[in-house]
Image: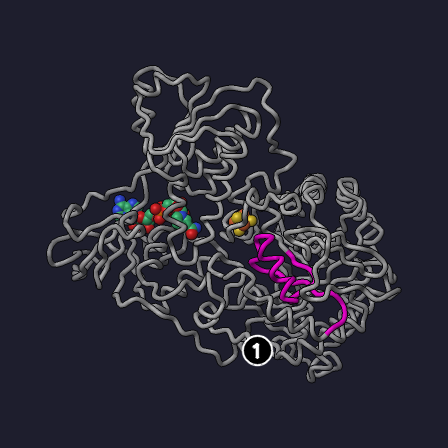
Amino acid sequence: MSSQPQRSSSGSRSPGHDRYPLLFEPLDLGFTKLKNRGIMGSMHTGLEEDPDGFERMAAYYSERAAGGVGMIITGGISPNEEGGVAIRNEEGQEVYAASKLSTPMEVEGHRKITEAVHGADPDVKICMQILHMGALAHNDALVAPSAVKSRINQYVPNELDEDLLQKQIDDHARCAGLAREAGYDGVEIIGSAGYLLSTFLVEKTNMRTDQWGGSYENRMRFPVEVTRRCRAAVGDDFILIFRIAAMDMLQGGMSWEEIALLSKELEKAGASIISTHFTWHEGSVPTIATMVPRAAFTSVTHRVRDEVSIPVITSNRINTPEVAEKVLLRGDADLVSMARPMLADSDFMKKAEEDRADEINTCIACNQACLDHAFAGKTTSCLVNPRACHETLFRYEPASAPKKIGVIGAGPAGLAYATVAAERGHRVSLYDAADEIGGQFNLAKRVPGKEEFSETLRYFGRMIEVLDIELHLGTEVDAEMLEGLDFDHIVVATGVRPRVPEIEGIDHEKVIGYIDAIKEQKPVGKRVAIMGAGGIGFDVAEKISHAGPSGALDVEVFAREWGVDFEGHPRGGVTGVEPEVASADREIFLMQRKESSVGKGLGKTTGWTHRLMLFRRGVQMMNGIQYQKIDDAGLHVLRDGSPELFDVDTVIVCAGQEPLRDLYDAAKDKGISIELVGGAFEAAELDAKAAINQASHRAAEI
Ligand code: NAP
Ligand code: SF4
């Protein structure tokens, strides 16, 4: 390396920024400088495989560069075909389908990204992530140190022979060299998450007996050699980040001593920065969901930082500049990686720098439009920012003819419509019968583990002020009132009402609705049946089975609930640690009519966490239920065709919703022209993601 990188000393205050001095302190790497400590972490968006992907990624990343981020790490690019994803064509042949960089011909596309980012701000660095999926790849030629199938992949990997193994090292080095040619400022090699490099490190996935397996020194050889060869390929003045699993969350995973040794060896091999990652994809501890406390894992990064002299990146659930600053102040890391927060708000860093942090559209860690899409092979976006990854297709242009717009309903759809329309220059008035904005989001934020939803309401509340939207709370708008209002355009976003199933005894005193249960407006007994196991049925089950403080707000509670020992750091952080889950003193039955497994429709990346937590609390989940009647004895059902009585004290109805269109229908009768958005338009399949997306698109067009 040409010269030693500078690291911030914990607690030292830079004179640069009053509120976030450490976040806005530059970092000198010796051969280059990062302008601040806030970096956009790598996230696969699906644009990598889109036909217009390079143009779209150029717009996506350059918007973040203009938004003040110090460094960007791209989504993963494979160094070869065996490390990526193939699909079968109509003839049944495999066709390579993932983005890779293994030939000079592939350099041109990447140049579009690097030129756009450097054009937006020449001081912003962009590094390409080299992602060899190893045993998680989807193709017949996938490779791994040993032929050990991952529990989350259908393919069994081919064990690497020496020639093929050397080829993987060569391919990484060539890929890094090509990235440099494409104008990147560096590369990040991913050596975590269950991808190729990490599987060399762990005994259960590396059963080799040659120089690449057996002792830890041998198991470490491959990632270290890849790093050394990549450094040789790119020269000294190029950023080389290695992403390690600082706590892999695997039973029998890496020990702390192994992680410390690996970090030191990577530094010697030429890494300029170590990035810390947590869990493998097959681990059973949530690390990115909304139930994970903010900055939950940075203490582990701190320990890694103590082992090396190069800068260290931390990540996971750091979603506000305040939290990022605290992490830096504790000396936990030199750089803070925020991937999803930059999706949610491309101007995150700019707003922080300009002391407008209260205007940041905060990532609420829901995963609904980002990781759930990525894992389903769909283009990523963001629930709170539907423009994310659609920058070339979807713009908020200034309105050519500003209008006076009335929006009735201040739930997610009404708020999105009002703020996008106002941002475009329309004059907007917003009405709601309730005395707070937010609609259904006010329920979500009361569910333990979903406290982050209140950030979206804080954001919208602030934007109402900034955009000078006239807000009328506690105002029930009826058709007569509408007639008297002087608007060019009226939007009805009155949302939904809970569906009341037609079951004998549905008006029995034992029966309550989910709103009363979540808002704790009616008592809930000791034995409870929840009728309906969609997102809200699960939320209600979480709310009424929960005991004690929320794990999302307390790292120690979270660690106990999920069986993680942050301090002792046994193998994987979890080996031999039993989860200790507190639960309310209740017997709960969560029911649905469908035969499919309960919770199947929940988010791909978070559904398992909700199911597992409820299971650990003893909630009984039942499918194939036919409701018969509710009476003093309880809930009568048919289960597998046989009658059964659940002698419950309370039945909570979570049977979905119907559109609330009374105002729309009344206005139509009076010949008032109005537009419907959100749940009032279509309640089926509607969630906040769809509501905000639809309303934002409509408001972008008017
Ligand atoms: P939902 O997901 O559509 O679930 C409705 C539930 O009610 C289903 O379990 C359905 O299952 C049952 N049901 C439907 N009609 C019924 C009837 N006539 N009688 C008895 N049961 C009936 O709706 P939701 O739970 O109200 O959630 C609303 C929206 O918000 C959804 O889009 C949901 O995805 C979203 N949401 C998401 C989350 C999240 O964490 N991602 C959390 C909360 C809400 P059966 O028909 O099988 O009985
Ligand atoms: Fe964050 Fe949810 Fe947006 Fe993903 S979809 S970036 S988790 S707010």
The quadrant in which residue 195 appears is bottom right
The residue carrying mark 1 is: 569
Q: Nearer the viewer, residue 679 or 71?
A: 71
At x 64%, y 70%, the residue is 302
Quadrant containing the N terminus is bottom right
The quadrant in which residue 120 appears is top right
**In the image, residue 238 lies at what x, y percent?**
83, 58
At x 41%, y 16%, the residue is 486
Asked if residue 360 is among those painted magenta in the image, a careful observer would answer no
- On screen, residue 391 versus residue 107, left or right, reads left
- The stretch of residues the image draws in magenta is 308-337
**In the image, residue 618 lies at what x, y percent?**
32, 68
322 shown above or below 244? above
- On screen, residue 140 versus residue 582, left or right, reads right
264 shown above or below 104? below
- Amino acid on which disc 1 is placed: His
Q: Nearer the viewer, residue 251 or 287?
A: 287
Q: Nearer the viewer, residue 627 or 15?
A: 15
**In the image, residue 64 lies at what x, y percent?**
68, 44
- On screen, residue 519 versus residue 211, left or right, reads left
543 shown above or below 229? above
